[in-house]
């Protein structure tokens, strides 16, 4: 099939080969089962949250709207890579068409961008609720909440397209093996025949900058919250510490691979592909757990739901 994507003049590669996750037959079988269960957990856990937030009018508040949005985004993020990764574990020859590879990169960066903005919005929401309780409803008005979600999508699209416009100019003429289970800029750029150094810089500057800024904004808002709680009373501090440490753990899990891949100035080994499993399979399953398990409103909503015999009302 001739390669005829607009803007990819001179490219001759139509199929890329992913090396995927390697290992013995037994390892692959175990990984297949493990990732299938994780993916099932991601779909069920996150869609359950979306369902709960839509169905229960007591949860119609900024925090839960953002949480439901984050859940949808988490489903999207893991769906860009995990199903393909599971199928490839069972396949000997792991090919992906050039177009699918580009589409995968695009979706990862759009959805990843939305996720980062939503995480900031949710941290800001908690900061407003805990540090400025009297102004909370003013600060997190429904309008501003919608604005956060819109900013997330606009940021995601601009973030992905700004890098993509550079990669469109590269020509791919020969090497086509990617030592990973998914496509992303750094590895794909390395396959280009034209000089790709400056494109590597563009990706590091864009994706790296975005991950770093988001990471520090999140840590900063958590620090503000901790200091506020600590000043107010020492009794609440341990409770806040437990909750926040769960959030910070997930944030560190999510951002370490990003910073490792985009900010680390040296050529990365194949370690980062394993690190990214945290982003695509672990944090999407952890988010519903940490945001709901210790949350009274959600527990009450689940009880209310289970008492509700007539589910048809919700449809
Ligand atoms: C996402 O957030 C917007 C803005 O607050 C809200 O209107 C929408 O219902 C949310 N989506 C879900 C699935 O809850």
Image (tube, helix red, strand yellow):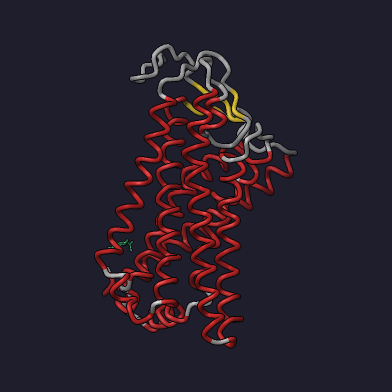
Which one is nearer the viewer's eye here, 259 or 115?
259
In the image, is residue 176 above or below residue 269? above
Query: Measuring 45% from the left and 15% from the top, which residue is drawn there?
Result: 11
**Horizontal side of residue 62 vs 271, given as left or right:** left
Give ligand 1's quarter of the image: bottom left
Q: Residue extending furthest left? A: 143
Query: Measuring 49% from the left and 49% from the top, which residue is drawn there?
Result: 78
Which one is nearer the viewer's eye here, 311 or 228?
228
Quadrant of residue 52 within the rendered picture: bottom left
Which one is nearer the viewer's eye here, 276 or 32?
276
In the image, is residue 106 above or below residue 67? above
User: Residue 195 location, x and y as percent?
Assistant: 53, 17
Quarter of the image with the N terminus in it: top left
Q: Residue extending furthest top? A: 10
Query: Measuring 46% from the left and 81% from the top, which residue is drawn there?
Result: 296
Quadrant of residue 56 within the rendered picture: bottom left
Quarter of the image with the C terminus in it: bottom left
Query: Measuring 46% from the left and 16% from the top, which residue is drawn there?
Result: 171
**Horizontal side of residue 183 vs 2, given as left or right:** right
User: Residue 30 location, x and y as percent?
Assistant: 69, 49
User: Residue 233 location, x and y as percent?
Assistant: 55, 87
User: Residue 164 location, x and y as percent?
Assistant: 41, 31
Which one is nearer the viewer's eye here, 1 or 50?
50
């Amino acid at each position: 099939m001739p390669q005829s994507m607009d803007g990819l003049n001179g490219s001759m590669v139509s199929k890329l080969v992913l090396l995927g996750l390697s290992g013995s037959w037994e390892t692959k079988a175990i990984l297949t089962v493990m990732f299938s269960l994780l993916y099932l957990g991601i779909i069920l856990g996150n869609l359950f949250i979306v369902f709960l937030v839509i169905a229960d009018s007591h949860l119609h508040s900024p925090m839960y709207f953002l949480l439901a949005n984050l859940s949808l985004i988490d489903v999207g993020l893991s769906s860009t890579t995990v199903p393909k990764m599971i199928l490839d574990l069972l396949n000997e020859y792991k090919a992906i068409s050039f177009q699918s590879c580009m589409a995968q990169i695009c979706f990862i960066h759009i959805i990843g961008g939305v996720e980062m903005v939503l995480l900031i919005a949710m941290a800001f929401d908690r900061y407003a609720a805990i540090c400025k309780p009297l102004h909370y409803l003013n600060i997190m008005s429904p309008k501003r909440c919608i604005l956060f979600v819109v900013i997330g999508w606009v940021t995601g699209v601009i973030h992905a397209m700004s890098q993509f416009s550079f990669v469109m100019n590269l020509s791919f003429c020969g090497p086509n093996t990617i030592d990973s289970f998914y496509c992303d800029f750094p590895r794909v750029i390395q396959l280009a025949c034209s000089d790709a150094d400056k494109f590597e810089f563009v990706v590091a500057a864009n994706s790296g900058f975005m991950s770093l800024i988001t990471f520090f904004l999140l840590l900063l808002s958590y620090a503000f919250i901790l200091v506020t709680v600590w000043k107010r009373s020492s009794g609440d501090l341990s409770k806040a510490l437990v909750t926040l440490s769960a959030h910070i753990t997930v944030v560190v899990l999510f951002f370490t691979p990003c910073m490792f891949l985009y900010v680390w100035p040296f050529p990365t080994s194949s370690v980062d592909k394993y690190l990214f499993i945290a982003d695509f399979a672990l944090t999407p399953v952890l988010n519903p757990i940490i945001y709901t398990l210790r949350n009274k409103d959600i527990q009450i909503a689940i009880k209310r739901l289970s008492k509700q015999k007539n589910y048809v009302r919700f449809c």
